Image: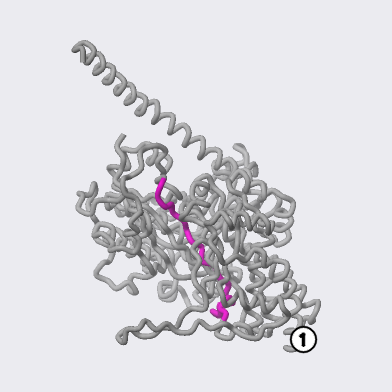
Amino acid sequence: MPTPRPFPKDDAPMSSPRLSPAGSAARASDLFGRLTFSGDTMLKRLPSDAYQKLEQTMRDGTPLDPAIANTVAVAMKDWAIEHGATHYCHWFQPLTGTSAEKHDAFLSPLSDGGAIEKLSGSQLIQGEPDASSFPSGGIRDTYEARGYTIWDATSPAFLIRNPGGVVTLCIPTVFVSWTGDALDKKTPLLRSIDAVSKQAMRILKLFGADAGVTRVITTLGCEQEYFLVDRELCDERLDLTITGRTLIGAPAPKGHQLDDHYFGAIPDRIISYMADCEAKLFELGVPVKTRHNEVAPGQYELAPTFENANIAVDHQMVTMHVLRQTAREHGFACLLHEKPFAGINGSGKHNNWSISTNTGVNLLDPRDETHTNMQFLVFLCAVIRAVDTYADLLRASIASAANDHRLGANEAPPAIMSVYLGDMLTDILNQLENGGTRKTLKGGTLDFGAHSIPQIPRHTSDRNRTSPFAFTGNKFEFRAVGSSASVAWPNTVLNTIIAESLDFLATELERKAGRNPTPAKLETAVRTVLKEVVKTHRRVCFDGDGYSESWHKEAAKRGLPNLRATADALPVIKSKRTIDLFTKYGVLSKRELAARYEVLVEMYVTVVAIEARTLLQIVRGQVLPAALRAQTELADALAAAESAEV
């Protein structure tokens, strides 16, 4: 059974022609957003009134004025046709964890035998896909097929072009049943963002920081890790083709023992592929920022800058599509599985999360004198409390059969949820616990002893890559999310537990200081409340080596859950506490939550069963015949030796 090379040969012939990056002669800034109906495109094509109303909806999340739907639909249709589109689709994210679409032509026949291209406001706003053919966890049965897709105007429509040049207008939508139950991942995500906004606004109002702020959003940037292997070699592996990972085989002679692949020079074929992906993603409005070699041979990473979490989730789905599609064009197979090869590092999707006002203020920015920034400390402690209180639910949010192979290994954080803060914030927590904050540790400067090298300011804390939930300057990095996963569900859970924690803190502060407190009274209340929060919840804070066995023992002493496998974690989703949490903040009903549990369990069982059947087929069809041939050859050799009286 052929084993693929651990990384693609740079000089190997490609099985398909290498394509030049889309618009390679153009600057990235000229390409950016060219295939999205947003920004200048909307401004040029919409009447001023319609533009302002749609732009306000996209910016502030205000309800869309139905009166502008026809105007927007016509402009969107004309723009898409000018780019070669013949069809449109409502693009949504069902509970499969992938995206889904049904293409309808713009073509509309006329009574005289002719035809025109048409997209009406009602067609833009609402569609009706079959709801019984997607996973629903019992919400829909085979005979209950009606479902609805509804336009999410806060996420720009975009054009997808396949390698054959077919262009389709994709309209981001939510997906619900005829009874109104959410059957997708976007609907609860949007609800969770609203829940965070409502509770965060209470905190801002207490601090008098709500002037001009109408909404709070969560922001997101997802680092995507992936493997590339030669397509022709991948096709020879039944396990890679069907399951996305190798189920059997010998380890490669060289893995990442020499530590020479990480941040190494990017091979020519790979960087051509990366540039092609980036050009396509720029056109789709995805703000790709970073590319580099990852630790394992054949492993790479792509990372964007921060965006509104709802748009970032859509962009993440598009990114995975572009990575896979473009790989085929370059003669590669792009493997997004969390652990495609045993014995070398797996892949994750680092979920960089923060919270911001609609005016652009990052509420997790500590500023220079952090000990005086009481508002930041409230939001920081809300996150710490949320992760500690709902550590088991946060763990369940990233549970999957694939991620089980990665979590707890030496390239990924353990299944124990803990928070890394670094020296400066840990010191401030100590001060809070002791009754007051007096100082902020400074990082100082680094002098390298060479006159030609400038001194640089040193950060106030190190980076801890072994922590599943680390503060990294002005955001938290949730490092346990799997590389193949949709980030919608982990962020829905994260937003919801943060909303609950902000609600708790806002209520406590209002109770102690009143709804319109003086600065002095508020500061006293903040110190009192945060002191108790730190005492109760700092057990979840850990700055040491998350890979070490000693941490596992220490975590058990602290009472932190260690749900090692998906089968241990998923039952948390159907617990009464989880149901109460999601129903209280209007994110998911009991019925919707139960459906997600059923879908996740079924998906886990199905994936494991597919892997088992694939392995059986390989053993029966390849391994056993090869073993029998070897046995026959040995027997023949032995018989020959005996006959020769050797």
Where is 361 relative to 107, above or below? below
Identify which residue is drawn at 47% across, 63% down.
222
Residue farthest to the front, as pictured: 646
Amino acid on which disc 1 is placed: Lys
199 left or right of 362? right
**Does the magenta portion include 202?**
no
507 left or right of 165? right
Q: Position of residue 134 (x, y in %)?
A: 55, 44
Visible residue check, residue 357: no
Secondary structure of the residue carrying tag 1 is helix
167 left or right of 379? left
229 left or right of 512? left
What residue is pinned by disc 1?
A: 521
Q: Position of residue 144 (x, y in %)?
A: 62, 41
Q: Quadrant of the N terminus?
A: top left
The foreground one among 43 and 254 is: 254
Residue farthest to the top, as pictured: 643
Visible residue check, residue 184: yes
Q: Position of residue 132 (x, y in %)?
A: 58, 41
Q: Main secondary structure of the magenta part?
A: loop
**Does the magenta portion include 358?**
yes
Identify which residue is drawn at 44% across, 50% down.
103
The foreground one among 52 and 204 is: 204
Where is 473 relative to 260, above or below? below
Please provide the residue range marked out in magenta. 343-366
The foreground one among 635 and 580 is: 635
Q: Position of residue 510 (x, y in %)?
A: 78, 77
Q: Quadrant of the C terminus?
A: top left
Task: Categorize mark 1 by other alpha carbons within 10 Å: few (<14), some (14-19), many (20+).
Answer: some
